[in-house]
């Protein structure tokens, strides 16, 4: 999906579904923010694990898109802290280049995972499905 295209949101109300995107690659972070904002979501971003937790404490996200390889606190540490704060009320979509994405996602309790590189349409569909099953 290109910037400016709209995806339909069956069952989701984007304005009430703030998303926190956490990735240390600034280009990936910006691209995901643009795509999700184009769909209609409020998006916060964080480039490391510590910033992610600070943002999550200040403004509870409806969903977190989380990379595993992060500076300061890695993705698994962030997931542990998020679950301690909010339990299963804040689902995590894991994004990682790790070839063991499925098992890593299972280990951290992620609701879904995507292995990098992934298609943008797959990301949007995964986010929508995860939010609609909350």
Image (cartoon, helix red, strand yellow):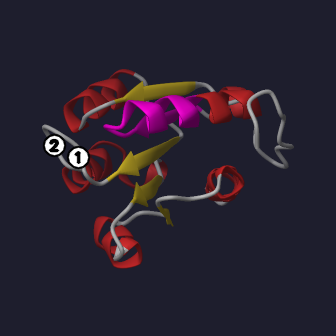
Q: Does residue 66 appear to the left or right of 71 in the view shown?
A: right
Q: Real-space Cα distance between discs 1 and 2?
A: 10 Å
**Quadrant location of residue 76?**
bottom left
Q: Residue at x 36, y 37 (%)?
A: 25
Q: Residue at x 47, y 25 (%)?
A: 44
Is 28 within the magenta?
A: yes
Is 112 within the magenta?
A: no
Secondary structure of residue under mark 2: loop
* Residue 71 on image: x %, y %: 17, 39
Q: Crowding near pointer 1: few (<14 within 10 Å), some, many (20+)?
A: some
Q: Mark 1 points at which residue?
A: 81
* Residue 61 on image: x %, y %: 48, 35
**Which disc number belongs to residue 111?**
none
Q: Mark 2 points at which residue?
A: 73
Task: Look at the image and give the residue range highlighted in magenta.
Answer: 18-33
Q: Which residue is drawn at 82% across and 44% down?
A: 9
Q: In this view, does 134 lie above or below 99?
A: above
Q: Are marks 1 and 2 in contact (CB under 8 Å)?
A: yes
**Quadrant location of residue 122?**
bottom right
């Amino acid at each position: 999906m290109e910037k400016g295209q709209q995806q339909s949101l069956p069952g989701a109300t984007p304005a009430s579904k703030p998303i926190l995107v956490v990735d240390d690659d600034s280009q990936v972070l910006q691209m995901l923010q643009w795509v999700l904002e184009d769909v209609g979501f409020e998006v916060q971003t964080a480039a490391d694990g510590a910033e992610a937790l600070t943002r999550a404490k200040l403004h509870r996200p409806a969903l977190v898109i989380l990379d595993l390889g992060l500076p300061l606190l890695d993705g698994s540490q962030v997931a542990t802290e998020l679950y301690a704060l909010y339990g299963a009320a804040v689902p995590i979509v894991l994004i990682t280049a790790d070839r063991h994405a499925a098992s890593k996602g299972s280990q951290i309790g992620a609701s879904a995972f995507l292995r990098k590189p992934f298609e943008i349409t797959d990301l949007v569909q995964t986010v929508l499905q995860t939010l609609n099953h909350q």
